[in-house]
Image (cartoon, rainbow, N blue to C red):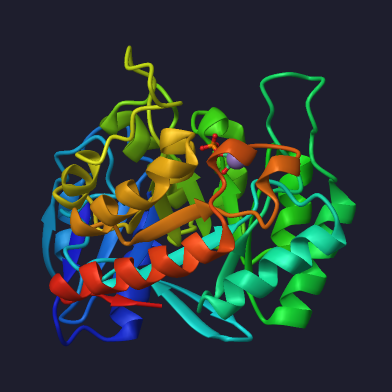
Amino acid sequence: MLVVMDAHATEEQVRAVCARIEQLGLKAHTIPGSLRTAIGITGNRGAVDLGTLESLPGVVECIPVSKPYKLVSLELKAEPTVVRISTPLGEAAIGGGSTVLIAGPCAIESREQAFAIARHVRDAGGKLMRGGAYKPRTSPYSFQGLGEPGLEILRSVRQEFGLGIVSEAVDHESLDRVEESADVIQIGARNMQNFSLLKRAGRAKKPVLLKRGMAATLDEFLMAAEYVMAEGNYQVILCERGVRTFSDFTRNTLDLAIIPAVKARSHLPILVDPSHGTGKRSKVLPLSRAAIAVGADGLLVEVHHDPASALSDGTQAILPEELVQLWDEARQIAGVLHHSMN
Ligand code: PEP
Ligand code: MN
């Protein structure tokens, strides 16, 4: 259910509507817009008793939201959400025509490795670096990430290079730690339907980068974002990273058609990860071009200065000089769509 407030409704009137919603045992989500404020209602099992709400001062109308996902939906908020991440290098804005490049290694391996790559990311013009301290690996015998020491390295990357940090949380404990150290909390493909982790991410005070599960439908993907938003965290960035198909020449099949499909349903920004989407260095640049052309709000790319010795995902990491080319071409393509890169 969506309560539409009058363009001239006062803050007090908005607060009174929220209070009434909470009195009914429901949750109110205030969504300010450029023209008017809307209040989303979640937590109702059936229809909400409209009589009590529609008569409150400042309320224009109450509209049922037809989609199973509510807060994520364009019905609730027609304007694109712009997630703003402040970094020492300046603000990185994601969404609403503002396109971002997030680059870095798959995993943080050492201080030397992280610093070498951070220098390249910054010199290429990036404001955000990715890098996992906690790695969800298929094999229990593979490198699992450095854990807390990895986060400590990321904190010094932030300090030394001014880059904002994007890092993955794999469970509640790591989420607590990532929330303290990173600027954006990544929830990986394997955890897209870990509902208890999604709820915890929804209580976090940092933006959440939510990757599509490798077998998730569009609705399941949006419902996962709804879990985060239902807890009160509206700073959600979606990320397409490829799905499993019979196609066997790439690691996954990058489903770029989901970008316009998401745009037709949701106000949330969506990135593309061509690294996990293809698993092959040679395919990252062409798919990055395509991703920007199809309207993605940015790219999440793995880069390594010495991919041959990377402890994870070396085959899909591009080289620093390729990052410069990718950034330059992405900027030109974004320009055609009147989008800006930051
Ligand atoms: C990653 O970004 O390093 C990662 C593990 O990605 P995904 O969850 O998409 O596999
Ligand atoms: Mn990886």
Of the pair 211 and 18, the residue shown nearer to us = 211
Q: Which residue sits at x=34%, y=28%?
A: 253
Residue 231 seen by the camera: no
Q: Quadrant of residue 342?
A: bottom left
Image x and y of residue 217, in percent:
30, 26
Image x and y of residue 81, in percent:
31, 66
Of the pair 155 and 329, the residue shown nearer to us = 329
Of the pair 297 and 143, the residue shown nearer to us = 143
Image x and y of residue 239, in percent:
40, 47
Q: Quadrant of residue 19?
A: bottom left
Q: Quadrant of residue 220?
A: top left
Q: Which residue sits at x=79%, y=59%?
A: 113
Drawn side of residue 135 relative to residue 83, left or right: right
Vertical comparison of 338 with 196: above or below: below
Drawn side of residue 229 relative to residue 263, left or right: right
Vertical comparison of 17 with 281: above or below: below
Q: Which residue sits at x=38%, y=41%?
A: 283
Drawn side of residue 174 relative to residue 129, left or right: right
